[in-house]
Image (cartoon, grey):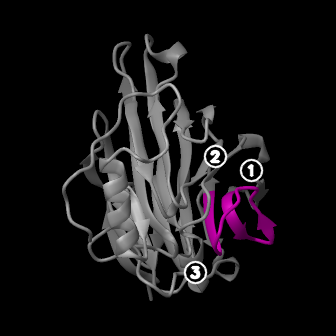
């Protein structure tokens, strides 16, 4: 019997001057554990006059996780952080009661051809931490736990699993795992997982039961402890999930909260431009109109 309860197809979304593949939220599944938003950026080839430029925009009630496969992004935020993220490293920004940041192509790459490819992820904060002070952590690629087992390569990008712990400072029980294999292998990791679990196929394919699943799909498991599949040669997949929260979390634009009043306050604060500023930045993304969902 297959352990797959839901298949989510990647959907095109426009984030300004950049197209992405949206994976979460989905109408039938708003969250997987504490993960409430996943965008697949690229792969995109940018010419010598095309650049990533996402002006300052706010967040509340969540942590963002940026993980690049190719390319480079210059992160600036209202804490005064100015840091370039490169492939394999992790930018972990916790918004708490409010933070503002921009994401741009670094200056030294703005007049050359470049690639952009990666994942942008939002992890909701527990209700009791939604109003915590914002903070930022950068973890270099070499500091992410990585190991091989039976010819399969693993990375624990965030959270805890397999008796290991990532240095990314998460605020609830979760895991975000990379699995790569150059050969076809059986994977059975259910004993190391907990809560809700999803699997994203970046490249290659997997087989579960009698079904074969290809890239640009998220598979939601019925039971994370039964996570078993066959990964085909030259495939890369990501396993993410953890304990779901007891209360519903609402999303409006870049704001996430279990309290709609906090979202309304954030909307007012952003409209009135009373959020903290990003040093050296004068642009900003205006508040959109869609309703809370």
The secondary element bearing badge 1 is classed as loop
Q: Earlier in the sequence, mark 2 or mark 3?
A: 2
For marks 2 and 1, give the CA distance: 9 Å
Residue 27 visible in image: yes
Magenta span contains residue 145: no
Please report the bounds of the magenta region as a residue range: 156-178
Whether residue 290 sits left or right of residue 261 in the image: it is left
Ranked by sequence position, the earlier of labels 1 and 3 is 1
**Disc 1 packing (10 Å; few <14; some 14–19; many ≥20):** some
The secondary structure type at the circle numbered 3 is: loop
Q: Which residue is mark 2?
A: 90
Q: Residue at (72%, 71%) from the top-left corner?
A: 161
- Is the residue marked by circle 2 packed among few (<14), some (14-19), or many (20+) residues within 10 Å? many
Q: Residues within 10 Å of mark 3 (few under 14, many from 20)?
A: some
Helix, strand or loop at label 2? It is: strand
Query: Is residue 177 one of those drawn in magenta?
Result: yes
Percent of width and height locating residue 225: 61, 85
Instruction: Answer whether residue 213 is visible to the viewer in this image.
Output: no
Q: For mark 3, what is the residue?
A: 243
Q: Which mark is residue 59?
A: none
Instruction: Name the disc covering residue 144, or none.
Output: 1
Residues at circles 2 and 1 in contact by the CB criterion of under 8 Å: yes
Q: CA distance from mark 1 to mark 3?
A: 22 Å
């Amino acid at each position: 019997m297959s352990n797959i309860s839901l298949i989510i197809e990647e959907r095109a979304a426009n984030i300004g001057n950049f197209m992405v593949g949206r994976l979460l939220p989905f109408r039938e599944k708003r969250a997987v554990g504490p993960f409430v938003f996943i965008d697949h950026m690229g792969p995109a080839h940018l010419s010598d006059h095309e650049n990533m430029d996402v002006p300052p925009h706010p967040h509340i009630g969540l942590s963002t996780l940026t993980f690049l496969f190719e390319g480079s992004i210059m992160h600036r935020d209202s804490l005064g952080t100015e840091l370039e993220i490169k492939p394999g490293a992790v930018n972990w920004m916790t918004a708490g009661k409010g933070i503002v940041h921009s994401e741009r192509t670094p200056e030294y790459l703005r007049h050359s051809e470049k690639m952009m490819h990666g994942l942008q992820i939002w992890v909701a904060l527990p209700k009791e931490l939604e109003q915590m002070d914002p903070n930022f952590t950068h973890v270099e690629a070499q500091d992410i736990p990585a190991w091989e087992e039976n010819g399969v390569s693993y990375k624990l990008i965030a959270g805890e699993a397999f008796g290991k712990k990532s240095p990314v400072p998460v605020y609830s029980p979760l895991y975000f795992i990379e699995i790569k294999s150059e050969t076809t292998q059986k994977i059975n990791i259910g004993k190391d997982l907990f809560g809700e679990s999803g699997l994203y196929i970046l490249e290659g394919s997997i087989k579960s039961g009698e079904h074969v699943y290809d890239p640009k799909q998220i598979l939601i498991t019925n039971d994370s402890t039964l996570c078993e599949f066959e990964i085909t040669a030259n495939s890369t997949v990501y396993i993410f999930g953890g304990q779901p929260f007891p209360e519903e979390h609402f999303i409006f634009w870049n704001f996430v909260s279990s309290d709609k009043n906090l979202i309304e306050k954030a909307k007012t604060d952003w409209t009135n431009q009373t959020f903290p500023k990003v040093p050296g930045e004068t642009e900003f993304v205006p508040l959109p109109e869609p309703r809370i969902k």
